[in-house]
Amino acid sequence: PFRRQLMLFLERGQSTMASDLIRRPSPVAMDKILMNKLQKKVELMVGKSDTLGTVDIELDGMRARLVDHYNTAKALCKEVGLAPMAVRLLRHGCPQAFQVQVRRR
């Protein structure tokens, strides 16, 4: 009987059935987690509440052409042109904002 009880305890400890402890937060906790993630992403985009940054880009124009050989006699041409333009990116805090201005020159 003693050996049988000892073997029972040993077999119970070597059980192949695994039980997982899965974290299941409440809907309120999930909302809080999502808001924290969103706030971190917004802060990454626009910076902390006391930062200021600007980027100015000026393009004199751009032209791109793509030529594909359709067959031995014909070619397929695609062309894109972009007028001269200026882009200004501005990020600042208090309140946090990210502003993009695109204008023609």
Image (cartoon, rainbow, N blue to C red):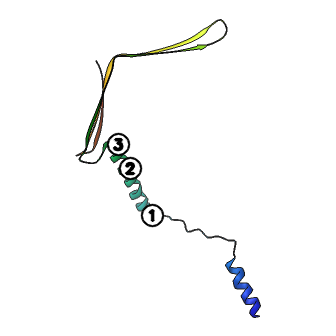
Disc number for residue 45: 3
Comparing 27 with 55, the one in front is 55
Residue 51 percent coordinates (x, y): 25, 44
The residue at 38%/58% (across/down) is: 32
- Please tell me in which quadrant of the rendered image residue 87 appears: top left
Looking at numbered disc 2 in the image, what kind of residue is underneath it?
Answer: Leu
Work out how far the residue at label 1 is from the one at label 2, CA to CA, in angstroms: 18 Å
Kindly identify which residue carries mark 2: 38
- Please tell me in which quadrant of the rendered image residue 8 appears: bottom right
Q: Quadrant of the C terminus?
A: top left
Quick one: SS at disc 1?
Answer: loop
Query: Which badge, 1 or 2, comes first in the chain's sequence?
Result: 1
Disc number for residue 26: 1
Looking at numbered disc 3 in the image, what kind of residue is underneath it?
Answer: Met
Work out how far the residue at label 2 is from the one at label 3, CA to CA, in angstroms: 11 Å
Above or below — where is 73 with respect to 13? Answer: above
